[in-house]
Every structure is written in C-alpha cells, then in structure tokens.
Amino acid sequence: MTTLTEEKIKFLEQKAAEIRRAVVEMLIKAKSGHLAGSLDMADIFTYLYFYALKHNPKKPNWEYRDRLVLSNGHICPALYATMAHAGYFPLETLKTLRKFGSPLQGHPHRDFLPVLETSSGPLGSGLSQTVGMALADRIDNGKSSGKQFYCLMSDGELDCGNSWEGAMLAGKEKLQNLTVIVDRNNIQISGFTEDIMPLNPLVDKWRAWNWHVQEIDGHNFTDIDRAVSEARSVSDKPSVIIAYTIPSKGIPEFERKWQWHGKVPMAEKEIEAARKAVGII
Amino acid sequence: MINSEQKLNPKLFDKDIERVSMRAGFGEGLIKAAERDKRVVGLCADLAESVQMQAFKEKFPDRFIEVGVAEQNLVTVASGMAAMGKIPFVGSYAVFSPGRNWEQIRTTICYNNVPVKIIGSHAGLNVGADGGSHQALEDIALMRVLPRMVVISPCDAIQAKKAIMAMAKTDSPTYIRLAREKSAVITTEETPFEIGKAQIVYKSNGKLDVGIIATGAMLYRALFVAKRLEEEGKKVAVMNLSTIKPLDEDAVIKLAHEAGALVTIEEHQIAGGMGSAVAECLAKHFPVPIEFIGVNDLFGQSGTPKELFENYNMGEKDVYEAVKRVILRK
C-alpha cells in the first residue's frame, strides 16, 4: 500500500532532480569522489528525508527521531545534498565538499558535521551500528518506542564479513524496527559485483538470516514507499529492501558503467555531458 | 621500602599471598558499575564464562547481548548502543578484541567518539598452555596509537575492579587489558586509584640509583627485585604505571630526575608498549638510560608462565640484571 499522491510524487521527483544537480556540481568542484552511487541513491535519499523519516532538521538531536545510518559513506555527496535541501545546513556549504576545514569531509565525520548519526567510510560496519542503536532503544523502550532505524548499504559492502555478522544478530534479536536498504547497483570499485565477488542469490542469503526481504525498483517512488511501509508493518523480524538501481542514474553516458564508481567528471566533455544530463546547462 | 601511603597488601612479600584473577575483579566491578548506572550494558563474543561476564549476564539479562564468535560485530554493535546513550562494556580475549577488530574500533568507536569500554582478557604470556596464538602481546601498541583511546593495565584484581568502576564514569573510549592467570593481590580496597595517575609503590630512602616502572601483574616481580636490590644497598623506586595512556608524564619525568636510570617491565612486545610510551616522553623531556623488559619481537608458545617468562628473558633474574646494566650506563 502507498499513501503517496501524484502531487507528492511529482514533488519528490523534482527534489531528486535538484539533489542530482547538486551532487554533480559538488563532485565536479571537488575533483574527486564517488559519482555512480551518489546519483543512483538520490531517489531513496529524497524519499526518506522528504517523506518517510520522522525528523526535524531544526532540532537534529530530537530524541524521538528516526535514525538513519549511511554505511557506505563514500556516497555522502547524496546524503549531504539531501540534508542541505532538507534544511540541516545552508546549501552554500555544499560547495566546500572535500576541502580543508569543510563540514563535508570526503567521507562523513561527525566531528565536522555533528548532525550525522555516525561517521562512516570503511565499509561493512554500518549495519552493526544500526543494530546496536535498535538494541539500545529496545532496552529503554521495549518494542513500542515508535522509532524506526534505517541503514543504507551498498551491495559491494556485502563482501565484508562484518555486514553478515550484523545481519545474523538482527535476525536473532528479531529487530522489527530495523530497515536496511541495499543499493543493488551491481557495481563496486573495480568491476561488476558478480565478477568481483558474486552476491547472488542475494534474497536467499538475507532470508536465511531470518529477515523479511523485498525487491524493488530503487527509482520508483511508489515502489519505494510500498516497501518501506511494508517493512514498518513487519512485527517479528528485521526488514531488508533490495533496491535495484542504475549506477550514475541521470547521466545516460555514464549509466551502468562500473568505471564511474570511484571517479568524477574531469575532462571538459565529461563535465559538459554530466551537466547537460542533469539539467544544469 | 613499601610506600605506606599506597596502603598495599600487608602480606605482599609472604609466600601465601592471596591470588585472584584480574578477570574476577572485572566481573565484580562490572556488576557494581551496572548497579550504579543503568546506562551500563554488556556485550560478549561467546566467552561470558571465561572473561567473567556470566554474573552480569545473569543479574542483568536485559542489558546483556551475546553476539557469538564475531568480534567485529561486538564492537560495532557496541558503538551503535553508545551512540544511543549506553555505556557498553565489551568482553573478549585481547588477541581477538582489539586484535581482530582494530579498524572497527578505530572508526566506529574512536573516530565516532563514543564511550565503548573494551575488555581484553588473556593478555600476556601468562595465558600459558594455550600457546602463542592466544597470548596477546601487541594490544597496548594497537590501542595506544588510537586518538582518544585511554589504555589501562591494572596490576591486580582489586585495581581491575576499581578501574572498571572508574571507566564507567568517563565519556572516553577505553581499553583495559587483563591477565588470565590468578595473580598476587598487591593492592587493597584502600589503595588509591585514579585513571591517568601513576603510583610510586616502593621507594628507598636517600638518593635513588634506579627506578623500575612496571605495568600489569609484572609489578609483583618488580617489587621482589626492588626488595633484593635494597637489601644489597641499592636505592630503588618502583612505579605502577596502570594507565599507559594518557601517560602520567609528570610522575615519569620526576622519577627519571630522581633515579637517573630506569627499567621498564611489561608482558607485551617491547615495540610500541608501555616502555615505548615512557621512552617517548623522556626522550623529549629528560633523557635517561632505559632498559626494556618485554617480549623482543617474538611470538609466545605453550608452557607454564614461569617457563615462558624465563625463556623470554622476563624473569626476576632478568629484571635484576637489567637494573645492574642500566646503572652502569648512567
């Protein structure tokens, strides 16, 4: 079931386009960073911050907020752009990505940007941290705290043993207010996931650890909303949403190419193609 | 002579001195800390009985998380709990935690700046029969290099208990290393303890010939060597350096001034350990000759603790000879 109206979907699509434009500009200016994942998760970030999350950008430490942990910190340009658009800090700050003294470090660091839930970058530890948050909340509030714990992960970081250690514990503890969204873009830094280290059958793996598993189109807001709503309604196990996304979504010339995982447009032609595609020029 | 201000065990040099494991002190301290502060939670990696978290688990079942044999998960889950306001104590063997999960400790605990308390049991050669794979000799180096990490190495079970209770009151990421074997109870409930403060536990009257700085259960050996030296007419002081980081620089520099030569002794690799921390401090502020007693770039092996200490040149005789050597270097 979805509560998204057509008007709301249009709004989210516009927001996601703004965020993609910001991501492209930020990375061109920074001259380094991770383009593909930042663009392919723009829709999910937009949906979460502009529709699903219980949060208040003016009161970032509000105790009863939902928690969102970005495990694959390298796609932080999308997180930063979304948080700025949501009102956590001025849009101007986005220009400082990866510069000395910037709140927007190359990978997220709470010392520099305290509105983040965690610092991240090294892969494979975000799920366990989110599991810890949900466990701590359950100790204090039982199963009825009303908070939802979200962890955004990449598919590549499912190579890490730590990811599956967290998955096992969440299954054991039946953390019903934990929702993981896996960015299933099928690429990682040096190739396609199924060439580097095959993850399929990915659904079976999560089911085996007693998770509720859904597969969606990660660029379709109705799909995303249905899955997140269903995840919230599951009462006896944690939920994972495997979101199929197109790496570098929004720049047709770069889409689906793993080579754009860890780089940014540098050549004049590339910069022009990227800017044109997302509507900057 | 024994520094009376430290209120040490009056039976210190008796053959029948009470021996208790530091692990037991940890278990007791954890329950006391948890009774005082409901934010205290415990996590373990399938070693609750061995590291003595069992009593905590039984008394506070809702505040205990068993993660299985998964040390990376142990500390990352604890990091998440700490981010929600808990004070997690995580228990395992030091070879696995912080041995196996160093990067997770660096990023999710220190870089994130959350108050997770890491208990590394079975540190040092005293593990004995289990062999080299289980004898952590690198953990001080691994932990003291991390920004924000506090590193504690208590000398006995009572000090371990006090350290645990003190750790529960701070906001710092903290590592404490514990020995497996029962060790002599050197201190008493009345002995002062403060994180970051070294204690002079033995001091001859008059101008010192040498200072011995010990950490962990090796303090007991240092005291016997000091007694023998004093009986032979040497003037000696012994420092218990129970907090390795932050280093009590004032106390170390003062001892270097007074003694002019030092021997450090620890159940750890010489490289990167407590002696290195002392040397880093003194090279800058007041260089004096130092002899380092520790494991010299080798792995451990099976044997009784006594056999191992003798084999690795860490026995009482070795400390005594190191003192003689360092005095000649003055």
Image: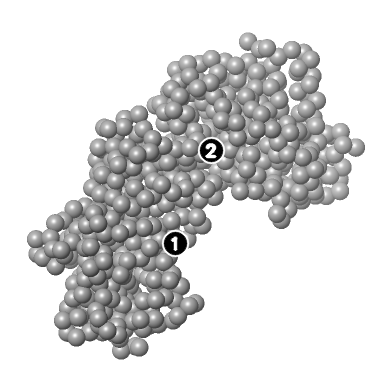
Q: Residue at x 69, y 16 (%)?
A: A222
Q: Which residue is drawn at 39% across and 72% down?
A: B252
Looking at the image, residue B75 sits to the left or right of residue B227; the answer is right
* Residue at the (82%, 39%) spot, across then down: A274
Identity of the residue furthest to the front in this view: B5
Do dots 2 and 1 share one subunit? no
For disc 2, the chain is A
Residue B50, image x and y in percent?
Answer: 25, 44
Frontmost residue, B16 versus A224: B16
Q: Distance between the residues labelled 2 and 1?
A: 29 Å
Chain bearing mark 1: B
Name the mark on residue B173.
none
Q: Which amino acid does label 1 sit on?
A: Pro
How packed mark 2 is, by other alpha carbons closer than 10 Å (few <14, some 14-19, many 20 or more), is: many
Q: Where is residue B25 in the image (x, y as percent from the top left)?
A: 25, 49
Front-most of residues A31 and B22:
B22
Query: For mark 1, what is the residue?
Result: B246
Query: Where is residue A221 shown, x and y percent of the image?
Result: 70, 20
Q: In the image, residue B277 lies at what x, y percent?
A: 42, 69
Question: What residue is at 48 percent from the left and 78 percent from the top?
Answer: B285
> Can you say whether B38 is above or below B52 in the image?
above
Residue type, numbered disc 2: Gly
> Based on the displayed image, in which of its 4 quarters is residue A37 positioned?
top right
Helix, strand or loop for disc 2: helix
Image quarter (top left, top right, bottom left or bottom right) of the N terminus of chain B: bottom left
Which residue is at the front of the view, B246 or A31?
A: B246
* Residue under label 2: A126
Q: Pointer 2 and pointer 1: residues touching (CB < 8 Å)?
A: no
What is the quadrant of the C terminus of chain B in the image?
bottom left
